Amino acid sequence: MAKGFPAFQGFGVIERAELIAQYDARQGCSFPNYVFDIAVFDMSKDFETFDWRWISDRRDRTLTIPETKRHAPYSWRAWTVAGHQGLGRIKRHS
């Protein structure tokens, strides 16, 4: 059975991570799992398009950090300046 959304839904940062215990009724036991809250960034200033060259640039060890931002979405560049305090203005509100 397929689960989740196999299509790109956006990008963002983890706001919170929590280790929880879940119960598996079929196995009759508990197991550890993680819950993540993710701030998905707004892409409206980029016309809802994602330039994958940004990801390739981030993998390129020969580029400087400023060079890796040349294809970065507007909201990512804004987040690198504003940080966590700016998430309210940068994340998607839908």
Image: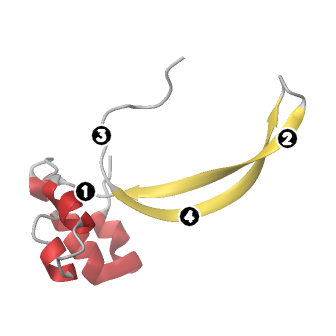
Residue 16 — which label? 4
Label 4 secondary element = strand
Query: Which residue bears the numbered disc 1?
Result: 42
Q: Amino acid at mark 4?
A: Arg
**Mark sitting on residue 8:** 3
Q: Residue at x 47, y 31 (%)?
A: 4
How far apart, in angstroms, are the residues tagged by discs 4 and 1?
A: 19 Å
Amino acid type of the residue tagged 2 in the rendering: Ser
- What distance separates the C-alpha of mark 1 from that of mark 3? 14 Å
Residue under numbered circle 2:
30
Q: Residue at x 9, y 50 (%)?
A: 47
Element on which disc 2 rests:
strand
Asked if disc 3 and disc 2 are in contact, CB closer than 8 Å, the reply is: no
Q: Which of the marked residues, 1 or 3, is nearer the chain's N terminus?
A: 3
Q: Are marks 4 and 2 in contact (CB under 8 Å)?
A: no
Q: Quadrant of residue 90?
A: bottom left
94 is higher (above) or lower (below) than 53 = above
Q: Give the image quarter of residue 85.
A: bottom left
Q: Nearer the viewer, mark 4 or mark 2?
A: 2
- Badge 4 or badge 1: first in the primary sequence: 4
> Badge 4: few (under 14), some or many (20 or more) residues near its Cα, within 10 Å?
few
